[in-house]
Image (spheres, grey):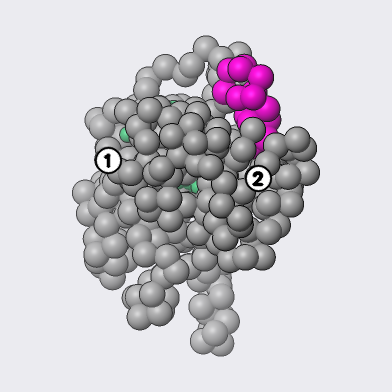
Amino acid sequence: MNLVLLGSWDDDERDAWAAALQAELPGHRLWWPGQAPLDPATVAAAIVANPPPGSLQGWPGLRLIQSLWAGVDRLLGDATVPADVPVARMVDPAMNRAMAETALWAVLSLHRHTFRYARQQHLHRWHVWPQRRADEVAVLVLGQGQMGHAVAQRLHEQGYRVSAWRRTPSVPAATRAAVGPAPWPVHSGPVALRVALARAELLVNLLPLTPETRGLLDARCFCAMPRGAAVVNLARGAHVVDADLLAALDSGAIGHAVLDVFSTEPLPPEHRYWSHPQVTVLPHAAAQTDLRSAARLAARNLHALAAGQPLQHLVDRQRGY
Ligand code: NAP
Ligand code: GLV
């Protein structure tokens, strides 16, 4: 098969992906912009990492778009992506583990006052905050998919009082068979969200960005949480209404925010988040795609396409994730 590799990356990153993918796809030809032209009609699949808008047009033989990213919001937001071509996203246990580590670090740091102590050190100030047990700290995880489940599992194992929120009330039978029932309460629907928010001292967001979830973390959400609660956003920047979060931080309604993702990335140098004393900024690094495992997982779907077998991790275009 002829395959195209399309992404928003520099040459070194693209070359690393091309080498890793080619090693997993011997016998298939991998092409990327800048190489000698090939007949677009001969291309069977595109392997993409945030491809530039419009770059998936003009491939009439395309039968699969395989994303190297877990979140496909930008891809689906490009109206020129052909509607009739299946899109598969990256689902990689290595990424889920990385996300669980980041969430655990953030929750432990908030629970054990690490960010406060760092500020105090800066001011040469000695003050001891109360030390609570993990099982006294209520953490709400938004999203119970690949990442949200891994995060809730890790926090539950650590002893936190975990609850979670998802879109559908029932867990798919295949998931239940694979991982068993979640030993923490899982809610769905807007009323249950308000109730869960009222109890949540820490909120960890792992929702996909869809029309339904855009702007969900807004003034109403922050007001619903106990005063001084913390927000950890590891999903997408546009889940948060930035002006509302800054107002909630300034008023003390929200005590701290750990933010890995932003509506504009890189976060502009003048943005208030950079210097806000109650904000911790990460550069979209919570769970990076692991080139070694991701190349193998992407190749598995392309082998399935070549063999006419079922494809894995297809995105529901209607649902948006
Ligand atoms: P996923 O497996 O598709 O899971 C999505 C979860 O969100 C599901 O539990 C789903 O509910 C729930 N959900 C979707 N729409 C909802 C709604 N309107 N209301 C309530 N719940 C809703 O996704 P994932 O692999 O866990 O990834 C989640 C997101 O993490 C990605 O989309 C991406 O934005 C982000 N991400 C960030 C990084 C980073 O480095 N910061 C890395 C990778 C991914 P159901 O279970 O009912 O379907
Ligand atoms: C990273 O944010 C991803 O969606 O893979």
Point out the residue furthest to the bottom here.
Answer: 124
Q: Position of residue 16 (x, y in %)?
A: 70, 57
Label whose residue precedes the other's in the sequence (1 or 2): 2
- The picture places residue 294, in percent across and down from the top left corner, at 66, 42
Magenta portion: prevailing SS class: helix
The amino acid beneath tag 1 is: Pro
Q: Which mark is residue 211?
A: 1
Q: Are marks 1 and 2 in contact (CB under 8 Å)?
A: no
Q: Position of residue 296 (x, y in %)?
A: 72, 38
Please state the horizontal and vertical placement of residue 183, each as a whole percent of the image. Answer: 56, 25
Residue holding disc 2? 30
Q: Is residue 237 magenta?
A: no
From the viewer's perspective, is residue 163 above or below residue 50? above
Whether residue 314 is visible, yes or no, is: yes
Q: Residues within 10 Å of mark 2 (few under 14, many from 20)?
A: many
Name the quadrant containing residue 140. top left
Which residue is drawn at the image coordinates 34% and 75% (left, top)?
272
- Amino acid type indicated by mark 2: Leu
Give residue 113's mark: none
